[in-house]
Amino acid sequence: MRILVMGGTWFLGKHIAEGALARGWTVTTFNRGHSGRDVSGVEPIRGDRTIGDDLNRLAEHGPWDAVIDTSSSDLAPRDVLMATAAIRPAARRWVHISTVSVYQGWPHQPLTDDSPLLDCPSDADDSFGYTGADGSPTLYGFQKAGGERAVTETFGHAAVLLRPGVILGPGEYVGRLPWWLERAKRGGRILAPAPAGQCIRPVDVRDVASFALDQAAGSASGGFNVTHPDGITFRGFLDTCLSETGGAGAPVWVDPEILAEQSVTQWTELPLWRTHAGVWAVDSGRAVAAGLRCRPIADTIRDTWRWWAGDGRPVEHPRRAQHGITPEKEAKILASL
């Protein structure tokens, strides 16, 4: 197999490149060289995927059996369309990393692979769409839906669309799991979102990478929700963080109504906490039937802590600063209970 990874130097792209090499594949990566380091053994090509001449130059390095695109999250649909059009003559398949945010009903409703999508044209610029008053739908979701349409219009039945919810694991740059690990290590009374039995379904980056590679080598097409089929309770999640870090802490489970009264921001100040009914109710049955295998989330927590506590640090990213409640605000809330 010869594959092209759009990105390929950090988190998911890095795991995909490493996994492909471990399978004995030939790997080309394409990026600007600004974030992360090239994986040893790949053929790195530098360029900007929003510049037509760079894409045409990239296509000359083909052909490839498949492209795996991990770097379109901040791109307008028209930029995705330009890239797919330029590379289509040199590639047989396109595996696109998308998001559950493309669904009209997320995060309010349970979702399947057949749930309705947000409507965005494939040639839209970065202004298309809007964010709703309650935070959904999002401009990001519209943009990613348009990116998916660009891929399917160009590659047809050779397009695969992977829609993860939350991806965690070694190398995470957003900082959700590392924040909880550091908070557990610090110990003491830990502000925790009730109910403790709420099931969350983040997926390990290594499992997403493996599934993406399987799809690159396969013949399936269409969309796949990539979420953990079993999940873990929030209590189990925090207990594992405490156990792995050795933190002498005790979660204090606080009802969502009280957290709202205290102006605790969902999803960011307490990472992974969100009260919308459908946020974790995303069915991954089609992906599981196609070979998605997810390790226990406790293993993801353990391996992330080993990476984080060692010499591992993520690529600098502005989103990391958005996550985690301040110690001062947390202490104030706990003292008021």
Image (cartoon, grey):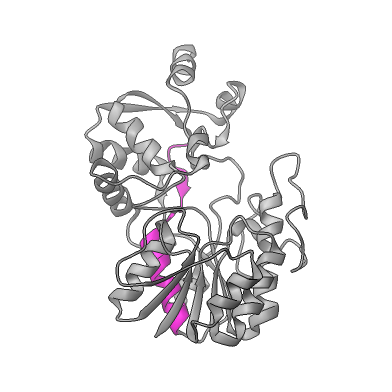
Residue 104 visible in the snapshot? no
Instruction: Note whether residue 315 is visible.
Output: yes
Instruction: Work out whether 112 lies above or below 336.
Output: below
Question: Which residue appears at 33% of the width and 52% of the height?
Answer: 170
| Image quarter in which the N terminus is found | bottom left
Would you say residue 165 sits in the magenta stretch? no
Q: Residue 25, image x and y in percent? A: 34, 81
Q: Nearer the viewer, residue 58 or 144?
A: 58
Q: Quadrant of the rendered structure where residue 27 is?
A: bottom left
Q: Nearer the viewer, residue 286 or 76?
A: 76
Q: Position of residue 322 (x, y in %)?
A: 52, 35
Q: How many marks?
A: 0
Which residue is at 56% across, 59% downward?
A: 282
| In the image, residue 216 lies in the stretch drawn in magenta | yes
Give how far across and how far down residue 201 sits, in percent: 46, 53
Q: In screen coordinates, is 249 left or right of 66?
A: left
Identify the magenta region.
195-217
Query: Does 131 appear above or below 150?
Result: above
Q: Residue at left 61%, top 83%? A: 88
* Left or right: 176 as drawn, with respect to 82: left
Left or right for 31, reference 261: left
Closest to the observer, 34 or 159: 34
Say above or below: 315 vs 335: below
